[in-house]
Amino acid sequence: MGAPKTSNMILQDLIFSHKANLTNSNNDGIDSLEFCHNPTHYKNYKYDVVYNYNSRGCRDKEWPETIQEARSAIWCMGDSFTVGFGSPYKHTWPQVLQNKVNKPTINVSIDGASNEWISSTAIKILKEVEPVNMILMWSYIHRRHGIREDGQGNNLIDDEQLRQHYIDSTDMEDMENFSQCIQSLLPWKNQTNFIHLTIPGYAPSNLIDHGHAILRQHYTNVVPCFRVLDFARDFHHFDILTSEHIVTEMIDLIKIS
């Protein structure tokens, strides 16, 4: 069950019920011996991995209770690379960042998140919280939302239900959609310090530079494509060395209020 809503609870509708309050799980997503990308790596992984999700359904501590605290925290948006599948919680890049800058981070990420999910969720936060800093680690451009019906003729438009839905589209159509997601945040550009980066292989190799050019066209703080220096237990997501590298690349871009 999700967190009970109260009249003064911030972002009352930002609750991912399928993960809310799940604790002490040793596996999640592809982070299992059955679904990992390299069973030998999985078996030899040297760290303990435990998944704990807060009352919002995010792999994070409980969020602040006041707008003031929420506004000063660094909001981190993304998909399973931001959740930190296959890694201990302290290895996730939002946690590494929090420890480096000694400033609270808030992890708003979910497995299978599309860029439409990331941007639409970010807009909810921008409208209500007006955070000083928001970091967006954009997902695969081919991972797209679509409108489905519930079997009774009603459209399903809930972001949580649609986050893993794919539609048939070309690479250039996917890139155009990515551009639209990026530009949807522009109304808050003078309010919030945005930092943008992308997951490894977020686009076909021939479009990776094009996607970053679109980001730089609209925003100043764009982290270059980073090298994956190590792998998490599932041998797909990155681990602590890469998280530390990412944080080094972005740390000077944080606005300290």
Image: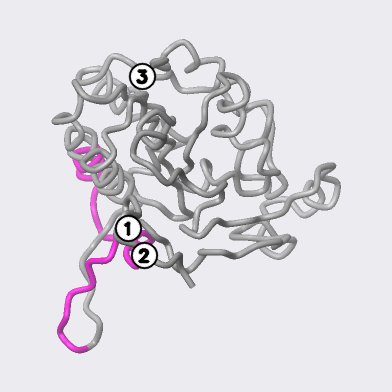
Asked which secondary structure carries label 2, the reply is loop
The spot of residue 188 in percent (x, y) is 19, 29
Question: Would you say the residues marked 2 and 3 are in contact, meaning their CB atoms lie under 8 Å apart?
Answer: no
Asked which secondary structure carries label 3, the reply is loop
Question: Would you say the residues marked 1 and 2 are in contact, meaning their CB atoms lie under 8 Å apart?
Answer: yes
Q: Quadrant of residue 89?
A: top right
* Image point (43%, 30%), residue name: 74
The spot of residue 77 in percent (x, y) is 41, 40
Using the image, tell me which numbered label, if any, was put on residue 222: 3
Instruction: Give the residue furthest to the top.
Output: 252
> Magenta stretch?
152-178
* Apparent side of residue 84 relative to residue 235 in the rendered image (left or right): left
The spot of residue 136 in percent (x, y) is 38, 33
Q: Amino acid at mark 1?
A: Gln
Q: Amino acid at mark 3?
A: Val
The residue tagged 2 is: 5
The residue tagged 1 is: 12
Q: Residue 37 colored magenta?
A: no
